[in-house]
Amino acid sequence: MHHYSLLDLSPVAEGATTTQALANTVDLAVNAERFGYHRYWLAEHHNMPGIASAATAVVIGRVAAATSTMRVGSGGIMLPNHAPLVVAEQFGTLAAMFPDRIDLGLGRAPGTDMNTARALRRYMDGADTFPQDVAELLGYLDDAPSDARVRAVPGQGSHVPVWILGSSLFGAQFAAYMGLPYAFASHFAPQMLEEALRTYRATFKPSKYLAKPYVMVAAGVCAADTDDEAHYLRTSQMLSFARLRSGQPGKLPAPVRDLEAQVPAPVLRMVHEAMAVSAVGGPDAVHQDLSQIVARYRPDELMVTGMIHDHAARVHSFGIAAQALADIQAVTHAA
């Protein structure tokens, strides 16, 4: 494992506002840089009361301005929602303001419900143009041919690193074909993780972007001083996820002692399955869980994420995780 990184969804807690959520994101980013995280990624979601990072490029700029060494980027920009030229201009602008610190992770899904997806787009013809859109976007970020009629300004020649994000074999196959780094969303959709990693590694084609496969695996984390406290704090995210899957999205709820009484058993089983790639507990338990994830999947980079209702507890959780990850990184480098 070369690096460990952090994915933030800018959670809006019950009783809080988006202003507070975004201030918490900036504070967490400053602490994440101090903890040694290599990247800080933000995700595009729309029409979700509990997530404040919809205008992802704007939030990336704010986080990059508050930090100085950590890479900052998208995990990801949902490309079907945007014209490739606009994305190139946005991230070219970010790269001009924060040289050599910006990443562009791209997703194929809309990151929302279909009614909101329709509101985001000027037209919907049902065609999957993701491969063509990625190729067009890469062209705008590359050096422009002399006869180019359309250029991204800023953007052209910026060579912002592009990642393919996914939770299925399509993303693995496409990233391998394009010779791009690949990040798997195993923090909420781990079912095809092992097969996708095998596919990506086995079929990767070296490119001008990347000489050999580079895989990032995402994992949930909820750490605290004791196992009991961590499992209690995690009920916020589990309850939130259960409500989302039941068609009742909302702000991030406070933790509860009676999760089984609030979530039907079949839904709770689904939540546990979706969040299976996770590290939960006190420092020793989290170290053990993260070590097992790294040993099993052999990621080049591990990205952790987790939503906790209390901001201070969330910062503390990522601090505990960083200590474990730094130790694991040292061991894997020495091996």
Image (cartoon, rainbow, N blue to C red):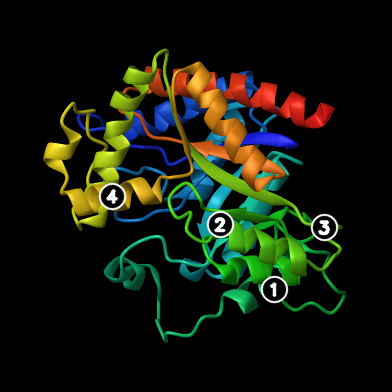
User: Which image quadrant: the C terminus?
Assistant: top right
Residue beneath label 3, please?
Answer: 210
Q: Are marks 4 and 2 in contact (CB under 8 Å)?
A: no
Q: Is residue 174 or residue 208 the one in the foreground? A: 174
Residue beneath label 1, please?
Answer: 135
Instruction: Estimate the x, y position of residue 72 in percent, counting from the top left.
Output: 62, 39
Give me the C-alpha separation between circle 1 and circle 3: 15 Å
* Res 35 seen here: yes
Give me the C-alpha separation between circle 4 and circle 1: 39 Å
Give me the C-alpha separation between circle 2 and circle 1: 25 Å
Q: Quadrant of residue 154?
A: bottom right
- In the image, 7: left or right of 327? left
- In the image, 144: left or right of 76? right
Q: Is residue 29 or residue 331 the one in the foreground? A: 331
Give me the C-alpha separation between circle 4 and circle 2: 19 Å
Instruction: Estimate the x, y position of residue 330 in percent, counting from the top left.
Output: 76, 24
**Mark 3 residue type:** Leu
**Mark 2 residue type:** Leu
Q: Nearer the viewer, mark 2 or mark 1?
A: 2
